[in-house]
Image (cartoon, helix red, strand yellow):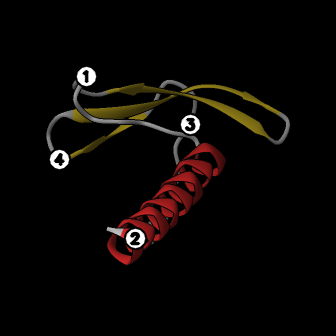
Amino acid sequence: MLALSRKKNEALVINNNIEITILEIKGEQVKIGISAPKEVPIYRKEVYLQIQESNKEAMNAEDVMDNLKNLFG
C-alpha cells in the first residue's frame, strides 16, 4: 500500500485518468472528490464487499440449480 500525505485542495492522479482531491478535513473525517471516466466503477469498500458477497451467493445458487437440472434433466 502506498501512503501519501495530502492537504486540503491537493490531489493525486492514478493511471493518467483518475484524480482524487482532498475537498475538506473536519476532525477525523476527510471528504474526497474523485474524477474518473464513467466506465470506471467506484464504490465505498463496505458496499464493494457486499456486492462481492451477493455475487458469491448468486453463483452458489446457480451451481445448485445447474446440479438439480442435471440430476432431474
Vertical relation: 8 (above or below) 43: above
Mark 1 = which residue? 38
Helix, strand or loop at mark 2:
helix
| Mark 4: amino acid | Asn
Q: Residues within 10 Å of mark 4 (few under 14, many from 20)?
A: few
Eye-nearest disc, 4 or 2: 2
Up/down of 70 relative to 54, above or below: below
Task: Give the CA separation, mark 1 to mark 3.
Answer: 26 Å
Q: CA–CA distance between discs 3 and 4?
A: 21 Å
Q: Of tags 2 and 1, which is closer to the observer?
A: 2
The amino acid pointed to by label 2 is: Phe
Query: At 22% from the left edge and 25% from the top edge, which residue is drawn?
Result: 37
Q: Quadrant of the C terminus?
A: bottom left
From this view, report whether residue 46 is shown above or below residue 61. Answer: above
Percent x, y of residue 53 = 58, 59
Q: Residue at x 43, y 60 (%)?
A: 62
Q: Residue type at mark 1?
A: Lys
Q: Which of the numbered marks, if any, corresponds to residue 7?
A: 3
Query: Comparing marks 1 and 3, which lies closer to the viewer?
Result: 1
Q: CA distance from mark 1 to mark 4?
A: 15 Å
Q: CA distance from mark 4 to mark 2?
A: 50 Å
Residue designated by label 4 = 15
Q: Could you tell me which residue is drawn at 37 percent across and 65 percent down?
A: 69
Which residue matches tag 2?
Answer: 72
Q: Position of residue 55 (x, y in %)?
A: 48, 55
